[in-house]
Image (spheres, helix red, strand yellow):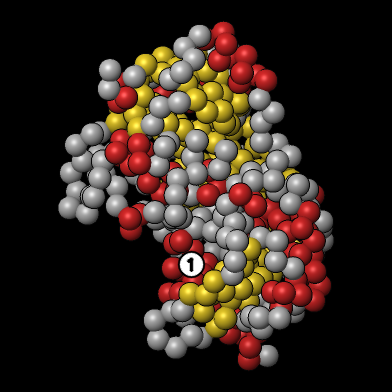
C-alpha cells in the first residue's frame, strides 16, 4: 500500500479517535492538538517555529491547492508535528509551485492526515480546550493510542524556545543605507518579521534567545526586538531576566511580538494565563484604541497577558474583540510597546503592518533626543 494511502488514527486525550489516511510521512508522534482557521498560508504555518510541539488541524477543508515553494517558508524547516486536513490536494495549480504539499511533508518527515471530520475535531478542541493528542500509522489500537495521549506530559512548563532559536548571531542588511540597527532576540523568529524590519531600513542582528542584556547592549543597537516563539513563556527565566535588565538599562526602544509580548509582560510585572484553545488564524478582530479602528489580524498563540494584572506603568493599546485578550500594551513613560498579533503575516492580513513604521519612528525620535 502506498504511504499516501496508509491508514492512520488520530487520538485525543478525551478518548475521541478519528480514522483517516496518511499524507506525507508515516510513523507516530505526540503533540498538543490545536486548530487554525486560515484559508491560506499552510506552508507558513508548517514552518512557523511558534508551532513547535503542536499538531495543527486546518478548519478550511481543502488544503494544498497552490503547492509549496521556498519563498513561503518562515524558517528552515517545518516545526508542526502533524498537519490534519479534510482533503489534501495532490495536483497544485500555481506558477510558483515547486512541489505538492504531500511531497513537501514526505521530504521533511512530517505526518499529515486527511479524510477525517475536521469540523468535529475542531469542535471538540474549541469546547474542551487544546489537548494532548497522538497520530500514528504504526499503532492502530484506539485504546492504546488514547492511553499514550493521556500519559504524555504535554507542553506546559516546557522550554521550547531553545529548540528553535539560532545557535549563533547573524546579521542581515537592508537594501541601501541602514537607518537603524536593531538587535532581534530569536525566540523562534519568522523570516517575514526580519523582512519587515529591513523594509524600514533596519540593519538587523539576530541573536540567540539566551543572549544576555550586556551582550545585546554591547552591539550598540538603536532598538531591541523580542520575537515570536513557541509554548509557555513562564519557564523562560533567562529571557524574562534579560528583558527586565534591558528595560532598566537600555534606555532605547523595545518592541515585542507574540511570545516577545508575553515575555515583556512578565518582565514588567504582569501575569500570564493559558487560553482555552488559543488564537490561531488569519481572521482575529481586535480594537486599536489609539485610532478606534477594528483590525483583522493573524495570530498564533495559546497564552495571553492577563489584563487586570498589568502594573501601573503599562496601558492596554489593543484588545481582542472575541474574548477581551490583551492584544497590545505600551509603557507609559518609556519607549516600550508590544503586540500579540502578527503584523508581518504572510499571506496576510496586513491591517497591522504599520506597527513596524511606528517602531522605526520611535527609534528616530529617540536618536534625535
The answer to whether residue 22 is left or right of residue 65 is right
Comparing 156 with 339, the one in front is 156
Judge whether 351 appears above or below 300 on screen: below
The answer to whether residue 39 is left or right of residue 365 is left
Comparing 332 with 159, the one in front is 159
Asked where in the image residue 333 lies, by quadrant, the reply is bottom right
Q: Position of residue 123 (x, y in %)?
A: 50, 22
The answer to whether residue 113 is left or right of residue 178 is left
Q: What is the quadrant of the C terminus in the image?
A: bottom right
- Residue drawn at (37%, 46%) of the image: 43
Judge whether 27 appears above or below 195 on screen: above
Comparing 255 with 355, the one in front is 255
- Residue drawn at (74%, 64%) of the image: 243
Label 1 environment density (alpha carbons within 10 Å; few <14, some 14–19, many ≥20): many
Q: Position of residue 327 (x, y in %)?
A: 61, 52
Q: Is residue 22 visible?
A: yes
Q: Position of residue 263 (x, y in %)?
A: 71, 56
- Residue drawn at (40%, 27%) of the image: 26
Judge whether 128 appears above or below 40 on screen: above
Number of callouts: 1
Badge 1 element: helix
Q: Position of residue 35 (x, y in %)?
A: 49, 33
Q: Residue furthest bottom?
A: 368
Asked where in the image residue 331 lies, by quadrant, the reply is bottom right
Q: Is residue 14 visible?
A: no
Q: What is the quadrant of the N terminus in the image?
A: top left
- Residue drawn at (35%, 41%) of the image: 107
Q: Mark 1 sits on what residue?
A: 194
Amino acid at each position: 500500500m502506498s504511504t499516501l494511502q496508509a491508514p492512520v488514527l488520530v487520538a485525543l486525550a478525551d478518548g475521541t479517535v478519528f480514522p483517516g489516511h496518511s499524507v506525507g510521512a508515516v510513523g507516530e508522534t505526540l503533540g498538543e492538538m490545536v486548530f487554525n482557521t486560515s484559508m491560506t498560508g499552510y506552508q507558513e504555518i508548517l514552518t512557523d517555529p511558534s508551532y513547535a510541539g503542536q499538531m495543527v488541524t486546518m478548519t478550511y477543508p481543502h488544503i494544498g491547492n497552490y503547492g509549496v515553494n521556498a519563498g513561503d517558508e518562515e524558517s528552515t524547516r517545518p516545526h508542526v508535528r502533524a498537519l490534519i486536513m479534510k482533503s489534501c490536494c495532490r495536483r497544485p495549480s500555481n506558477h510558483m509551485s515547486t512541489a505538492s504539499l504531500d511531497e513537501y511533508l514526505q521530504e521533511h518527515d512530517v505526518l499529515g492526515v486527511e479524510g477525517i471530520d475536521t469540523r468535529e475535531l475542531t469542535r471538540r478542541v474549541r469546547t474542551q480546550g487544546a489537548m494532548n493528542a497522538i497520530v500514528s500509522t504504526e499503532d492502530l489500537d484506539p485504546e492504546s493510542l488514547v492511553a499514550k495521549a493521556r500519559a504524555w506530559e504535554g507542553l506546559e512548563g516546557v522550554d521550547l524556545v531553545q529548540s528553535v532559536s539560532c545557535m549563533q548571531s547573524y546579521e542581515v542588511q537592508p537594501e541601501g543605507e541602514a537607518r537603524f540597527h536593531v538587535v532581534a532576540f530569536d525566540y523562534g523568529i519568522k523570516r517575514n518579521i526580519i523582512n519587515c524590519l529591513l523594509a524600514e531600513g533596519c540593519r538587523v542582528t539576530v541573536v540567540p534567545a539566551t543572549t544576555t542584556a550586556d551582550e545585546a547592549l554591547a552591539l550598540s543597537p538603536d532598538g531591541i526586538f523580542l520575537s515570536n516563539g513557541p509554548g509557555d513563556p513562564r519557564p523562560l527565566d533567562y529571557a524574562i531576566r534579560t528583558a527586565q535588565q534591558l528595560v532598566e538599562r537600555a534606555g532605547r526602544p523595545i518592541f515585542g511580538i507574540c511570545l516577545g509580548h508575553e515575555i515583556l509582560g512578565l518582565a514588567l510585572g504582569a501575569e500570564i494565563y493559558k487560553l482555552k484553545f488559543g488564537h490561531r488564524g488569519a481572521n482575529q478582530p481586535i480594537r486599536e484604541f489609539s485610532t478606534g479602528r477594528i483590525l483583522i489580524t493573524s495570530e498564533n498563540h495559546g497564552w495571553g497577558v492577563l489584563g487586570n494584572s498589568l502594573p501601573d506603568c503599562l496601558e492596554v493599546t489593543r484588545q481582542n474583540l472575541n474574548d477581551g485578550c490583551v492584544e497590545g500594551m505600551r509603557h507609559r513613560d518609556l519607549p516600550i510597546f508590544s503586540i500579540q498579533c502578527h503584523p508581518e503575516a504572510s499571506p496576510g492580513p496586513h491591517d497591522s503592518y504599520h506597527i513596524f513604521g511606528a517602531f522605526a519612528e520611535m527609534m528616530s525620535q529617540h536618536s534625535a533626543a
